[in-house]
């Protein structure tokens, strides 16, 4: 798929579906790894995020961060292949080989850092704010809880803005090799609203997609049970597989968005 063949303002779902098919080998590996990790997590449960007394558990928090990173790691090659496909029209396994091992490692290192930061933020959000959200739904929200919820909302907005401003890092790194923070920030500022609106749309679209997939998940699970697979493993395999597919689609869509942001910024430079 040639990214320059479409106008900048076109929506990205069609391109995302095309990339899902073109990168199906890499996506299949990511889905299988996710299913394997889900099975290992179920077989070897770690410490809970909250202790028996309801207090936050440091071992549980560390375990949550580790699990987040492990489940996100298979998505990094999907993001890399998607970037290469949009920017260079090289797809599938060939995209993995386009820059050799050095290109994959350079892209992967930075993505792991981003995943680590997101894992810490997600764990802190669960520890600090989820209990307040549950109290709010039960109508028992206190003043201190209200302040924490406001702070949590501000933190989420700040994280989203930072993600949109710095999201084109992958495209800049893939095309230039060396990345300057100022260059990435400039690209993000130029197309901030374009990227923000589409990222929010993707976030709203994914729950709908998940809900539409529930009947299919039930059918696939029933088929596995009919073939002799126990109910619990069958549900684990199906839920992990569908979750991985949705996560891969989200990664592909976001990759298309930020690659187009970078391509448009390059067109603006050429016009100047």
Image: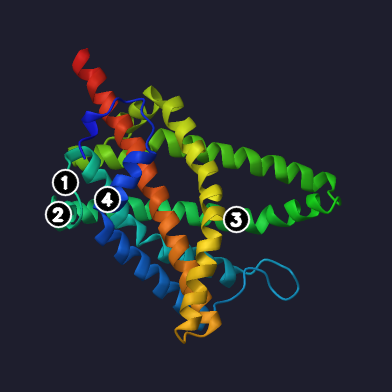
Q: Is residue 75 above or below residue 192?
A: below
**Mark closer to the observer (3, 1):** 1
What residue is pinned by disc 3? 124
Residue for point 30% across, 36% down: 259
Distance CA(mark 1)–CA(mark 2): 6 Å
Nearest the viewer among 31 and 162 is 31
**Label 3 to label 1: alpha-carbon separation:** 39 Å
* Secondary element at tag 1: loop
Q: Looking at the image, which residue is at 73% across and 51% down?
A: 133
Q: Whole-Å distance between the Cαs marked 4 and 3?
A: 28 Å
Mark 3 or mark 1: whose residue is earlier in sequence: 1
Mark 2 element type: helix
Residues at marks 4 and 3 touching, judged by CB atoms closer than 8 Å: no
N-terminal-most mark, 3 or 2: 2
- Indicate which disc, 4 or 2, sits on the residue closer to the N terminus: 4
Check disc 3 and report its element: helix, strand or loop.
helix
Q: Residue 49's spot in the image, x, y percent?
A: 62, 68
Quarter occupied by residue 258: top left
* Circle 4 residue: 80
**How far across and down, in percent of the image, does residue 194 sit?**
42, 27
Q: Position of residue 69 (x, y in %)?
A: 43, 62
Local crowd size for mark 1, using a 10 Å CA cut-off: few (<14), some (14–19), many (≥20): many
The answer to whether the residue labelled 1 contacts the one labelled 2, judged by CB atoms less than 8 Å apart, is: yes
- Report whether 154 appears left or right of 149: left
Q: Position of residue 228 (x, y in %)?
A: 46, 87
Figure quadrant of the N terminus: top left
Q: How is the image coloured?
A: rainbow
Q: Which mark is residue 90?
A: 1
């Amino acid at each position: 798929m040639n990214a320059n063949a479409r106008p900048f303002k076109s929506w990205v779902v069609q391109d995302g579906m095309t990339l899902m098919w073109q990168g199906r080998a890499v996506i299949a590996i990511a889905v299988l790894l996710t299913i394997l990790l889900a099975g290992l997590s179920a077989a070897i449960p770690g410490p809970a995020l909250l202790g028996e007394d309801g207090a936050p558990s440091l071992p549980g928090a560390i375990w949550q961060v580790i699990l987040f990173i492990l489940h996100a790691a298979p998505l990094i090659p999907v993001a890399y292949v998607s970037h290469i496909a949009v920017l260079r029209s090289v797809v599938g396994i060939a995209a993995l080989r386009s820059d050799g091992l050095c290109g994959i490692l350079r892209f992967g290192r930075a993505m792991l850092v981003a995943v680590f930061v997101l894992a810490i933020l997600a764990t802190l959000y669960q520890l600090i704010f989820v209990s307040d959200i549950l109290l709010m739904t039960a109508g028992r929200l206190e003043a201190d809880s209200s302040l924490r919820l406001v702070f949590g909302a501000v933190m989420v907005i700040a994280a989203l803005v930072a993600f949109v401003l710095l999201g084109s890092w992958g495209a800049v790194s893939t095309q230039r090799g060396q990345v300057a923070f100022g260059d990435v920030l400039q690209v993000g500022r130029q197309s901030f609203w374009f990227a923000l609106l589409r990222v929010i749309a993707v976030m709203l679209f994914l729950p709908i997609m998940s809900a539409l997939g529930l009947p299919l998940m039930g059918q696939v699970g029933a088929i596995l049970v009919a073939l002799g697979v126990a109910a619990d493993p069958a549900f684990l395999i199906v839920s992990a597989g569908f979750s991985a597919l949705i996560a891969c689609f989200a990664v592909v869509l976001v990759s298309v968005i930020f690659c187009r942001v970078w391509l448009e910024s390059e067109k603006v430079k050429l016009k100047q």
